[in-house]
Every structure is written in C-alpha cells, then in structure tokens.
Image (cartoon, rainbow, N blue to C red):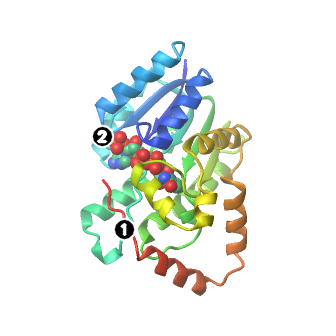
Amino acid sequence: MEYALITGATGVLGTAFCKELASLGCNLFITGRDINKLKDLKTSLVAAYPGVNCSFFAADLTRGEDRKNLFAAAEGYSFNMLINVAGADIQKPFEEYDEQKLTFQTRINFEAAVSMCNFAVKHRASNLKIINICSVCGLQPMPYFALYSACKGALIDFSIALGEETKGKCVTVTAVIPGSIYTRADVVEYINSLGFWARKSAKTPEYVATKSLKAAKKGKRKIVVGGLNKLICALSKTVPQGIKLRYIARSRARTQKDAF
Ligand SMILES: NC(=O)c1ccc[n+]([C@@H]2O[C@H](COP(=O)([O-])OP(=O)(O)OC[C@H]3O[C@@H](n4cnc5c(N)ncnc54)[C@H](OP(=O)(O)O)[C@@H]3O)[C@@H](O)[C@H]2O)c1
C-alpha cells in the first residue's frame, strides 16, 4: 500500500493538502508536533473519506532524535508522495534573534525538508512526487525577513537540483512558490493590512494545494502560484536590486511576526 507523507499536516495549508489528497483516495501519513491535533485531523479525515488509511506520528522536525523516531515509525511504508509543508515565518530584525530562534527557523524551513526528502527517496514507491512548499520570499533577499527568505531560497535551489539528480529515476521534485496565503488568523490580518495588490494576489490554501498537486502531477520543477504573483515576480526582475532592497526594508521593518 502506498502513502503520501505530509509534514505540517496540522497547519492550515497542510490540512488543505490532506483533504484534497484524501478526496482523491490517497492514503496519508501525517506529521506535526502536536499529537492531539494529529489525532483530531485523522478522525475528521477518516470520517469524511472512510476508504482512506491515515497514519500519524508526532515529531518536532527540528530535532534529529525526533526525526529518527519518525523514520523508524515510517520504516515499513512505501511513499508515492512527500509534501514538505512545515515551516516557520518568523519576521524581525536579525539582531533580535537568539541562537535558539535562529536554529529553529533554519532547521524547520530547510534542514527538516531536506532530511524528509532523503528519507522519502530511500523509501519510495515505484513513483515518488516531492512537493516542497517554498515562498516568493525565497526569490529575493529580504531585509527584516532575511533568514526566512534565505531558507526558502535555499529550498527552491535544493528542490531544482534534486529534481535533476533524480531524473529518470521515477522521482520528480516540485518547488512550489506561493505568495501570501490566507492561513492562520495573524497571517490573514497581516495580508488584510497590506495594500490592494497584496490582497489581490493572496490565495486560499485550497487553491495552493490544488495548483501544487497539478504541477507535481505534470512533473514541473517549480511553479509560482497565481497569475498576479507570476506577473509581480517577472516585473520585479526588471527592478534594480538596491531599489528592491530599500523598498522591502522599509515595508518589512514596520511589522514583526514571532510565532512558535
Ligand atoms: N501563509 C502564508 O502566507 C505563506 C506564504 C508562503 C509560504 N508559506 C509556507 O507555507 C507553509 C505552511 O504555512 P501555514 O501558513 O499553513 O502555517 P501554519 O498553519 O502555521 O502551519 C505550520 C505547520 O508546520 C508545523 N511545524 C512548525 N514547526 C514545526 C516543527 N518544529 N516540527 C514539526 N512541525 C512543525 C506546524 O505543526 P504544529 O501543529 O506542531 O504547530 C504546522 O502544522 C510554511 O512552510 C510557510 O512558510 C506560507
């Protein structure tokens, strides 16, 4: 029996992926830090889609020991899909970071995703589709969001390189590059506080999940999600780096996010 492995399944975007995959009849192996949230998610998925098998394992993916335990629990499974959704969007001046915060953000946004890819490639079914959830923030260095944008940028590059390495081996890797997504309440509030274009380009989690799965099915290397986001990304390439950095610094310095 084949399974889709989903990290960050208990988050807003992760849950949208779970629902979409379950509605397609895929078996799920879901993970997040909170065992009670995982149990609740499994209960609701199995109630809505009785034919679907759902296994779960709670793990803090920033911890090597937890990942080891997760891999041991998932050892006998065969995976046809990995979706790395888990991530942390801490945004604040870099000098306000402490060691714990910076290792947490780096590990969950990059190291954990890479580690999950390694596990899934070694435990793949006859075909494996990997989706790594990156961000448009990874396409451009972002002052006051520097670590997040650097990690997501690294994840984009890693995904593309891994996809080339695994070409011809029935493994595809898709870097999904969304703009803003209406997820947690604080994120929705932030999007609504931005200007017209930011609100216009924001997407629902369901939209992002559907587009990501379609792109993975076609074996695409990377997709920017949404027509307006594609246009903004294309136009921003024509703007000199210095101007972009000053604009981003001015707008991002006004807000902070320090979740988790
Ligand atoms: N929202 C946006 O505007 C936006 C835009 C572009 C990209 N993204 C990316 O989309 C992804 C999902 O975002 P979201 O807004 O849906 O976030 P979310 O609702 O906060 O979900 C984050 C998920 O990551 C999991 N997670 C966090 N730290 C973890 C850790 N140390 N170990 C294991 N799991 C951990 C959380 O699990 P717990 O249940 O344990 O907390 C949760 O399931 C992230 O990668 C984010 O960077 C978001």
In the image, what residue type sits under mark 2? Answer: Asp
Residue at the spot of label 1: 256
Who is closer to the viewer here, 210 or 107? Answer: 210
Q: Nearer the viewer, residue 210 or 186?
A: 186
Q: Is residue 243 above or below residue 84?
A: below
Q: Nearer the viewer, residue 100 or 241?
A: 241
Residue 183 horizontal side relative to residue 98, left or right: right
State whether residue 254 is above or below residue 21: below
Q: Quadrant of residue 65?
A: top left
Decide if ligand 1 comes within 8 Å of the CB at mark 2: yes
Q: Disc 1, ligand 1: is the CB inside 8 Å? A: no
Q: Earlier in the sequence, mark 1 or mark 2?
A: 2
User: Which residue does the image show at 63% across and 59% down from the upper left?
Assistant: 200
- The circle on residue 165 is none
Secondary structure beneath dot 2 equals helix
Say if residue 114 shows up in the picture: no
At label 1, the amino acid type is Gln
> Farthest residue toward the top?
51
Disc on res. 66: 2
